[in-house]
Amino acid sequence: MEIIYQQPELARVAGKLWNTFGHIKIWAFFGEMGVGKTTLIHQLCVYLQVKDTISSPTFSIINEYKSNMAGTIYHMDWYRLAGEEEAEKAGVEDCLLSGNFCFVEWPGNAPGLLTENILHIQLGLVNEHTRKLKAFLL
């Protein structure tokens, strides 16, 4: 799937992603700093009726949310992780193996923890206001 969108269309994009890939438990978000990974995850959580405060887990590494539609969601940011060993110490592997939904930013910092049946979402800049999203299963 490939989608080109602007900020006002983000709710529609989140709904389309969920309706297409909502059966996949682990979503890996790739893209440069500032491309909109956290913003997209925030909108997905809004779509999934998360009632908790949705925020970036840059410093906490893992945020846990409760959703009326999806149950428990783990939002992880691996930007500050130095590798798989540090990720395991932070409890990342427990989340990935929990059977709950996991939205992972910066998955390239511990790639060995992501095995199969992972939704890869690649975000890129088209211009200042427009993003390009590619979503595919690996």
Image: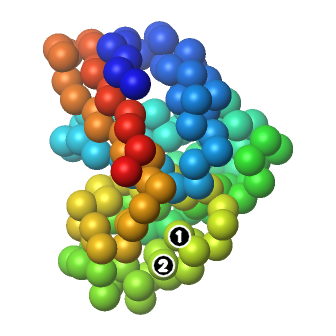
Q: Is residue 57 above or below residue 38?
A: below
> Looking at the image, do the residues carrying marks 2 and 1 touch, with CB atoms under 8 Å apart?
yes
Q: Estimate the x, y position of residue 121 in percent, counting from the top left.
A: 36, 39
Residue at 57% from the left image edge and 48% from the top image edge:
24
8 lies left or right of 21: left
| SS type, badge 2 | helix
Q: Is residue 57 visible?
A: no
On the image, numbered disc 2 is attached to which residue? 93
Quadrant in the picture for the N terminus: top left
Q: How is the image coloured?
A: rainbow
Question: How many marks are shown on the rendered structure?
Answer: 2
Q: Estimate the x, y position of residue 101 in percent, counting from the top left.
A: 61, 56
In terms of depth relative to the viewer, which is nearer, 72 or 116?
116
Tell me the crowding category of disc 2: few under 14, some 14 to 19, or many 20 or more residues within 10 angstroms, Cα based. Answer: some
| SS type, badge 1 | helix
130 lies left or right of 19: left
Say the numbered circle drawn on residue 44. none
Task: Point out the residue furthest to the right here.
Answer: 68
Q: Estimate the x, y position of residue 107 in percent, counting from the top left.
A: 31, 59
Q: Is residue 92 above or below residue 103?
A: below
Q: Amino acid at mark 2?
A: Glu
Q: Is residue 62 above or below residue 130?
A: below
Say the numbered circle drawn on residue 96. 1
Residue at 72% from the left image edge and 43% from the top image edge:
50
Residue at 37% from the left image edge and 51% from the top image edge:
138
Q: Amino acid at mark 1?
A: Leu
Q: Estimate the x, y position of residue 7 in percent, counting from the top left.
A: 41, 16
Residue at 24% from the left image edge and 61% from the top image edge:
108
Q: Is residue 115 visible?
A: yes
54 lies left or right of 31: right
